[in-house]
Image (cartoon, rainbow, N blue to C red):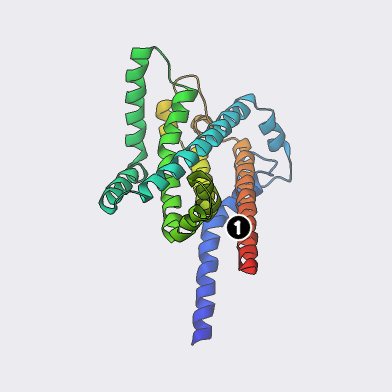
């Protein structure tokens, strides 16, 4: 009976994985298709060549990566400090602030995007500026920060607070005790929050659409513009590269965390 359940469970997991990754596998396959249709016409790398020679796509990719990197780093710092501050609040206040910080996560993106657009339009009329890079960056930092708080808070709850107190008793000041005891304990949550912030910023369309203005273009907006005219196989090549980069980053992070946990287990 247990063997049959194990087989059924394996089949179920295989079907779920197939359902999730088969479309991506098809996309990767057709990024090497010599034709522009769904009919296979031979292997080629010309779509990758055209991709790197398309100035509009490369500019949009550069803008997207710059915004994602800056937004993820800033939101990680702000979110980590916010999580530490929330954790040290009284229980009632902590519960209220935690629920408020989760609102941007559950709030529909269309509402957030329109809200930011109205805010930046209002401020632009007062201070005479146009929406563009900085407005997109501020919007991305704002909606990425709660995800960092969400990832760091569980690590703070799991941490043994007596380690921090012991560091103070052994001669560390508060900053040294925090850096040597708290930061290593919450680092997995910080890294998870960083990766999640980077991914959400890289992928965001709705909020960027409402806050980018007329001159600033990101990759999701560029792809949307291309799809309105005709689907180009360069999109397949671009999506393949993004998927490979994402998987590579995840593998590197997971391998490093596994080795760190193995080293801690060996030293304990």
| Residue situated in front as seen by the camera: 136 or 226 | 136
Point 52% across, 68% down: residue: 13
Residue 95: % across, % down: 29, 51
| Residue situated in front as seen by the camera: 120 or 223 | 120
Point 52% across, 57% down: residue: 20
Q: Which residue is mark 1?
A: 257
Q: Quadrant of residue 53?
A: top right
Question: Which quadrant would the C terminus be assigned to in this image?
Answer: bottom right
Q: Quadrant of residue 141?
A: top left
Point 61% across, 41% down: residue: 236
Apparent side of residue 60 relative to residue 259 in the rendered image (left or right): left
In the image, residue 69 sits, relative to residue 263, either above or below, namely above
Viewer can see residue 206: no
Apparent side of residue 204 relative to residue 38 in the rendered image (left or right): left
In the image, residue 177 sits, relative to residue 36, either above or below, namely below
In the image, residue 33 sits, relative to residue 227, either above or below, namely below
Residue 149: % across, % down: 42, 47
Q: How many marks?
A: 1
């Amino acid at each position: 009976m247990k063997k049959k359940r194990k087989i059924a469970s394996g089949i179920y997991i295989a079907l779920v994985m197939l359902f999730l990754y088969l479309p991506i596998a098809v996309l990767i396959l057709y990024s090497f298709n010599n034709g522009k249709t769904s009919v296979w016409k031979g292997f080629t790398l010309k779509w990758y060549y055209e991709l790197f020679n398309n100035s509009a796509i490369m500019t949009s990719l550069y803008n997207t990566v710059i915004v994602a990197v800056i937004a993820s780093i800033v939101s990680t710092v702000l979110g980590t400090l916010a999580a530490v501050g929330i954790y040290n609040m009284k229980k009632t206040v902590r519960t209220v602030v935690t629920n408020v910080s989760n609102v941007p996560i559950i709030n529909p993106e269309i509402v957030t995007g329109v809200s930011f657009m109205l805010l930046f339009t209002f401020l632009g009329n007062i201070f005479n500026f146009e929406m563009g890079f900085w407005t997109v960056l501020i919007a991305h930092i704002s909606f990425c920060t709660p995800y960092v708080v969400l990832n760091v808070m569980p690590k703070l709850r799991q941490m043994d607070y007596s380690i921090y107190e012991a560091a103070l008793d052994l001669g560390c000041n508060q900053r040294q005790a925090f850096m040597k005891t708290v930061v290593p304990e919450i680092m997995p949550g910080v890294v998870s929050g960083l990766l999640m912030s980077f991914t959400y910023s890289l992928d965001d369309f709705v909020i960027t659409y409402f806050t980018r203005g007329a001159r600033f273009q990101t990759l999701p907006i560029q792809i949307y513009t291309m799809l309105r005219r005709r689907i180009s196989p360069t999109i397949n090549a671009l999506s393949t590269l993004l998927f490979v980069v994402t998987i590579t980053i995840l593998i590197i992070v997971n391998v490093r965390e596994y080795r760190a946990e193995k080293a801690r287990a060996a030293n304990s």
